[in-house]
DNA sequence: ACCTGAACACCGTTCAAGT
DNA sequence: ACCTGAACACCGTTCAAGT
């Protein structure tokens, strides 16, 4: 006599993400997720393999959203303008997802899936190729992504404490990177 | 009748760091630390306020070592050469401390202390001032540090999967950054 | 086929009792 | 003044029993 499903993997992932964003990784407990979806904790193991798997599913959902927003920020006409737009989109995304963003590049949480990573990096690679030439496309993309990731990570961590205008630092860096890429062809 | 101390804060921090470097944050349990220093877990609370405090002490020890190595990498003659040397030192340090390094900029672990942060950033700020001029010193330092941190974080996370030579990407970026800083004055 | 209570091993932490 | 065993609340996870 089959028992009807009282929740779904989707609901479990959504609840997990909300808990993570609200209270950090510590708040994402199987008990809290179970309460949120209206089921007992052991039942969650019918939906996800375990807590680590649930975290991975959340991270991947966030990563795919990021990739989609980056794709949407590319106009396709002016590569320098597109790079500025993509960088801004990336930064705003991190600020909107301050607790989940840092997990995207965290090896302890498995990081994002290959699919999400490839999709995010492809847009940047194309812009890098347009600016720096095909031979420097990959190295240029790695420069831009490393900088953007480092910057927003430090910003989220509250690491910019020496005063000064953080917006200025962002704009200064972005113009410097565009110039460095354009000058290397 | 006083009981003699059977361990010390230093030994506790050293044991904690070793466990963290060997097995990640999960392996740093009060029980494992207690076993390592030859005492029962409750006794650790005479040395550290709790597990979070112990992690913070480990992170700070690592951060001060990083700051010292960076200081030692500065020659003081050629700013561009010094920047390359500092960046290389930074990267090698991260590779030598793959489990503790990511905690340095992790807000969940409190990150590094203000003292450690200030000391690390000051050397980079001076080099940035020498290359880009005093007015762009802070923004330039933030560009370099954000890139270096992002790069080594991604490298440690295994995020460079599109093939290509990661060493080339490092050198290409470093030369681009030196050019961008030098060109902005 | 899914849900549940009970149980297990583990965790950080507290505290009264020992020396 | 420090160390200890015992205890507490919590955690992830397993599993036999229910429907």
Image (tube, coloured by chain):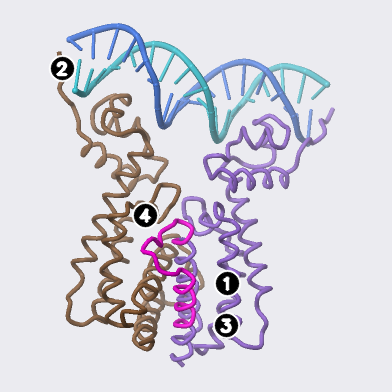
Chain colours: A brown, B purple, C cyan, D blue
- Crowding at dot 3, Cα within 10 Å, few <14 / some 14-19 / many 20+, comes out as many
User: Label 4: few (<14), some or many (≥20) within 10 Å?
Assistant: many
Q: Residue at x 62, y 64 (%)?
A: B66
Could you say which is closer to the camera, residue B156 or residue B107?
Answer: B156
Residue mark closest to the camera, 3 vs 2: 2
CA separation in Å, label 4 and label 3: 31 Å
**Which residue corresponds to mark 3?**
B127
**4 or 3: mark nearer the eye:** 4
Instruction: Point out the frontmost of discs 1 and 4.
Output: 1
Regarding mark 1 in the picture, which secondary structure is present there? Answer: helix
* Numbered tag placed on residue B88 in the rendering: 1
Residues at marks 3 and 2, CA–CA distance in whole angstroms: 70 Å
Instruction: Name the quadrant containing residue A15.
Output: top left
How far, Cα to Cα, is label 1 from label 4?
25 Å
Please name the residue shown 46% across and 68% down the image: B166
Q: Are marks 1 and 2 on the same chain?
A: no
Q: Which chain is home to disc 2?
A: A
Query: Which residue is labeled 2 in the image?
Result: A2
The correct choice, above or below, for A100 with respect to A2 in the image is below
Which circle, 3 or 1, is nearer the viewer? 1
Q: Position of residue B18 (x, y in %)?
A: 64, 46
Distance of label 1 from label 2 (alpha carbons): 61 Å
- Residue A100 rendering spot, x and y as whole percentages: 35, 52
Label 3 sits on a secondary structure element that is helix
> What range is drawn magenta here?
B154-177
Q: Which residue is mark 4?
A: A104
């Amino acid at each position: 006599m089959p028992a009807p499903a009282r929740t779904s993997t989707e609901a479990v992932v959504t609840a997990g993400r909300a808990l993570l964003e609200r209270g950090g990784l510590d708040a994402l407990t199987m008990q809290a997720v179970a309460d949120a979806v209206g089921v007992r904790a052991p039942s969650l193991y019918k939906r996800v393999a375990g807590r680590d798997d649930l975290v991975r599913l959340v991270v991947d959902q966030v990563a795919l959203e990021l990739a989609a927003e980056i794709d949407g920020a590319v106009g396709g006409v002016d590569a320098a303008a597109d790079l500025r737009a993509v960088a801004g989109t990336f930064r705003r995304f991190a600020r909107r997802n301050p607790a989940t963003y840092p997990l995207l590049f965290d090896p302890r949480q498995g990081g994002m899936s290959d699919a999400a990573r490839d999709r995010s990096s492809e847009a940047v690679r194309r812009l890098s190729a347009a600016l720096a030439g095909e031979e420097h496309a990959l190295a240029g993309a790695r420069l831009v992504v490393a900088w953007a990731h480092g910057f927003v990570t430090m910003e989220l961590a509250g690491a910019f404490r020496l005063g000064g205008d953080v917006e200025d630092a962002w704009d200064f860096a972005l113009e410097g990177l565009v110039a460095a890429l354009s000058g290397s062809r």
